Image: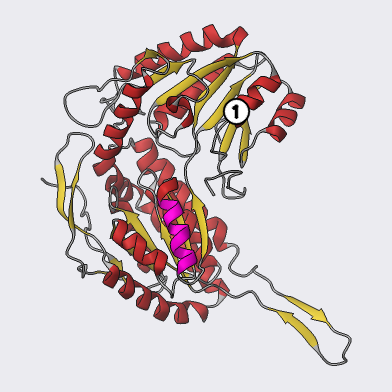
């Protein structure tokens, strides 16, 4: 198979691609047509993690002594290179996932670049303090010091963004980072590390490994890694938290998914609410941790909302393999996720009314017609568990108190969305929703200038 751009399959350590010391090799297939992209994806072993840590330790000595303005300059140059190489980086993502260009080439590289530009501004603004004492000629000095070697374990659905969310603040604060790319979608993460060297960031400041559970466990237990940030499942996040406690009590940041509620009140702009519901499902094919995938619609609007959403879903389903006709045409990003979503849908048919979709589309690839389930029980798996696919559940409500209770009846608390024409109601209800971020009349919820966290088990 011929590829438009080189697809690296080796770990990137101290500024170069090197053969992994571990012997595990993985085969990666295209989610578009099931073809084999590589049979030689080199997974990092504990020995490779050790090598990356030693590289990072050496790099930290250089990065520590790099002037803040130089750090800022190289980070800004890195951001520029990400944008300049957006087509190549997007190819590295979409060749595996089938992700449409509007996201792989435009949204993700630009978002990653924005994160590096934003945090570059902090390189000379991390101030300590100087506190006078009662003793003449003496001062109390507070210095903010970097943690040194940190690690980031990234998600398969948005590799460049999760890489940048971890790497940009870490290196701006004077740390160095070992990033573990998902073995399900590693190419763009490996490509972007090479651009860091071109930007002038010293070798070893950003190392990238490919890995399965062995690499993740080695990073979590490593005594020289002082912080680890993970994006992924609750089960794996719990293991990382335990490993961190059992090793050197390293600091941990976890972002573990979500099942965000969408509340559509009787005074909402129905067209906007329906359009945003479609964007939620179509944009990443439902594969986003903060997407609103359970919807609570006021009874007075429910019939029109369901009809409007169903019509758009069915129109979209006819072109989900045609990127020219549909800018959101996309499969599920990996065969493992594809099988998981189909399994959820089959079980969901016993829990709620399937209004439309939910079946495989075509004879190859990971395409699923987006599904709408209506009025599941409050404890049904289809509305309580994160599915990570194009599956929306719709329920109805009559009162504010009722919908707040339904929205908060979840183990997740990452995001929420409210549609209403009333400013007072938006402020009142958002204050009672148990979520880290709440958007009103929009699905734009994540931005580098805003905190991003959860009220519940995701963090």
Q: Position of residue 106 (x, y in %)?
A: 40, 42
Predominant SS along the magenta part: helix
Q: Which residue is mark 1?
A: 407
The residue sitting at the left extreme is: 1
Highlighted range, magenta: 236-246
The residue that appears at 64% across and 74% down in the rendered structure is 144
Query: Is residue 329 in sight in this rendering?
Result: no
Q: Position of residue 163 (x, y in %)?
A: 42, 55
How are the colours assigned in the image?
secondary structure
- Give the vertical position of 318 relative to 45 (above or below): above
| Crowdedness near tag 1: few (<14), some (14–19) or many (≥20) residues, C-alpha within 10 Å | many
- Give the vertical position of 158 relative to 244 (above or below): above
Q: Which quarter of the figure is the N terminus placed in?
A: top left
Kindly indicate the quadrant of the structure image that contains residue 346. Answer: top left
The residue sitting at the bottom extreme is: 137
240 vs 317, left or right, is: right
- Give the vertical position of 305 relative to 44 (above or below): above
Query: Is residue 17 in sight in this rendering?
Result: yes
Q: Position of residue 437 (x, y in %)?
A: 61, 40
Residue 241 is one of the magenta-drawn residues: yes
6 vs 144, left or right, is: left
- Give the vertical position of 186 relative to 23 (above or below): above
Q: Position of residue 279 (x, y in %)?
A: 46, 27
Kindly indicate the quadrant of the structure image that contains residue 269. Answer: top right
Q: Nearer the viewer, residue 29 or 358?
A: 358
The residue that appears at 49% across and 74% down in the rendered structure is 148
Residue 362 is one of the magenta-drawn residues: no
336 vs 400, left or right, is: left
The residue that appears at 38% across and 36% down in the rendered structure is 102
SS at badge 1: helix
Q: Nearer the viewer, residue 75 or 142?
A: 142
């Amino acid at each position: 198979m011929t590829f438009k751009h080189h697809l690296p399959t080796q770990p990137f350590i101290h500024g170069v691609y090197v053969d992994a010391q571990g012997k595990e090799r993985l085969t990666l297939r295209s989610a578009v047509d099931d073809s084999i992209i590589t049979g030689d994806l080199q997974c990092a072993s504990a020995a490779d993690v050790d090598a990356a840590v030693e590289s990072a330790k050496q790099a930290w000595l250089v990065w520590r002594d790099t002037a803040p303005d130089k750090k800022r300059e190289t980070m800004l140059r890195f951001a520029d290179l990400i944008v300049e190489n957006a087509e190549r980086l997007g190819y590295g993502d979409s060749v595996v996932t089938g992700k449409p260009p509007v996201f792989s080439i435009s949204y993700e590289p630009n978002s990653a670049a924005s994160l590096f530009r934003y945090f570059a501004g902090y390189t000379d603004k991390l101030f300590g303090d100087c506190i006078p004492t009662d003793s003449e000629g003496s001062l109390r000095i507070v210095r903010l010091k970097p943690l040194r070697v940190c690690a980031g374990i990234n998600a398969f659905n948005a590799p460049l963004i999760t890489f940048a969310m971890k790497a940009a603040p870490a290196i701006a604060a004077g740390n160095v980072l070992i990033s573990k790319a998902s073995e399900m979608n590693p190419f763009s993460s490996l490509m972007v590390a090479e651009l860091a060297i071109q930007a002038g960031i010293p070798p070893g400041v950003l190392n990238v490994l490919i890995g399965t559970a062995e690499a993740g466990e080695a990073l979590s237990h490593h005594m020289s890694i002082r912080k680890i940030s993970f994006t992924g499942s609750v089960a794996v996040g719990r293991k990382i938290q335990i490993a961190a406690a059992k090793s050197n009590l390293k600091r941990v940041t976890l972002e573990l998914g979500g099942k965000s509620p969408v509340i559509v009140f009787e005074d909402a702009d129905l067209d906007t609410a329906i359009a945003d519901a479609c964007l939620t499902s179509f944009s990443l094919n439902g594969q986003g941790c903060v997407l609103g995938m359970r919807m609570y619609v006021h009874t007075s609007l429910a019939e029109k909302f369901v009809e409007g959403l169903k019509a758009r879903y069915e129109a979209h389903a006819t072109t989900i393999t045609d990127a020219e006709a549909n800018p959101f045409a996309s499969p599920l990003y990996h065969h493992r996720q594809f099988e998981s979503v189909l399994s959820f849908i089959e079980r969901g048919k016993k829990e709620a009314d399937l209004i439309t979709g939910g079946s495989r589309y075509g004879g190859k690839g990971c395409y699923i017609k987006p599904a709408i389930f209506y009025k599941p029980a409050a404890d049904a798996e289809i509305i309580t568990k994160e599915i990570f696919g194009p599956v929306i559940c719709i329920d109805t409500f009559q009162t504010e108190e009722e919908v707040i209770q339904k929205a908060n009846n979840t183990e997740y608390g990452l995001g929420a969305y409210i549609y209403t024409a009333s400013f007072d109601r938006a402020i009142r209800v958002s204050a009672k929703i148990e979520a880290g971020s709440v958007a009103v009349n929009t699905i734009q919820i994540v931005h580098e200038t805003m905190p991003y966290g959860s009220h519940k088990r995701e963090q």
